[in-house]
């Protein structure tokens, strides 16, 4: 978490209790863990109804690249080979063109969400910023109804969150 954002426990309280739409209270949980041996890298997880819905970490992004044939899966697996094309692919495929995201991208989107108005956040190009806004208590039914067609060309995981939010 950026120093300006304070503690993770404070941010978690903000996300799960203070800004959460009533329908989401008690249904979502945000986790943050530090990856052992990864020089302070973290991973964030979103749980909905006790099940992990989305994970935000370097490994999920690199696995995304490998699964889509954008990077080779080295055999035998060495750390250097595993990460070989990662930075080039990060440049070629910004968050708007991917379905997986790093912990830093999670933090950047959270900062964007916290420092922007809700209208800007809900219509952001960044799918992670929209994710935070979908949980926000300031987003009402009419805004959600209008948002449906706007999300048609967005990642499936974001559309699924939208469907969950509008199901109640």
Image (tube, rainbow, N blue to C red):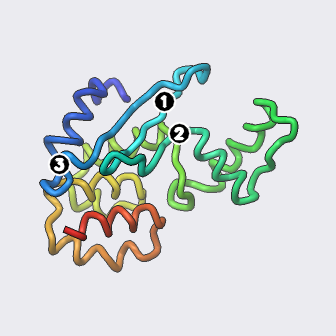
Q: Image point 14% across, 66% down: which residue?
A: 140
Q: CA distance from mark 3 to mark 2?
A: 25 Å
- The tag on residue 42 is 1
Which residue does the numbered mark 2 point to in the structure image? 57
Position of 167 relative to 68 (above/below): below
The location of residue 6, given as percent across then percent down, is 27, 25
* Residue 159: quarter of image: bottom left
Q: CA distance from mark 1 to mark 3?
A: 25 Å
Label 1 neighbour load within 10 Å: few <14, some 14-19, many 20+ = some
Residue at disc 3, secondary structure: loop
Position of 142 relative to 108 (above/below): below
Q: Earlier in the sequence, mark 1 or mark 2?
A: 1
Residue at disc 2, secondary structure: loop
> Would you say 16 lies left or right of 75 here?
left
Q: Earlier in the sequence, mark 1 or mark 3?
A: 3
Q: CA distance from mark 1 to mark 2?
A: 7 Å
């Amino acid at each position: 978490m950026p120093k300006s954002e304070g503690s993770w426990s404070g941010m978690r309280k903000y996300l799960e209790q203070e800004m959460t739409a009533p329908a989401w209270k008690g249904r979502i949980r945000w986790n943050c863990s530090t990856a052992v041996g990864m020089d302070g890298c973290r991973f964030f997880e979103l749980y909905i109804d006790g099940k992990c819905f989305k994970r935000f970490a370097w490994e999920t992004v690199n696995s995304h690249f490998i699964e889509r044939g954008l990077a080779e899966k080295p055999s035998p697996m060495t750390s250097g080979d595993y990460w070989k094309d990662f930075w080039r692919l990060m440049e070629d495929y910004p968050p708007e063109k991917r379905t997986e995201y790093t912990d830093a991208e999670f933090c950047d989107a959270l900062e964007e969400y916290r420092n922007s108005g809700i209208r800007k956040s809900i219509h952001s190009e960044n799918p992670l910023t929209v994710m935070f806004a979908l949980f926000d208590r300031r987003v009402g039914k009419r805004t959600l109804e209008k948002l449906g067609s706007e999300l048609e060309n967005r990642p499936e995981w974001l559309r699924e969150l939208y469907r969950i939010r509008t199901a109640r």
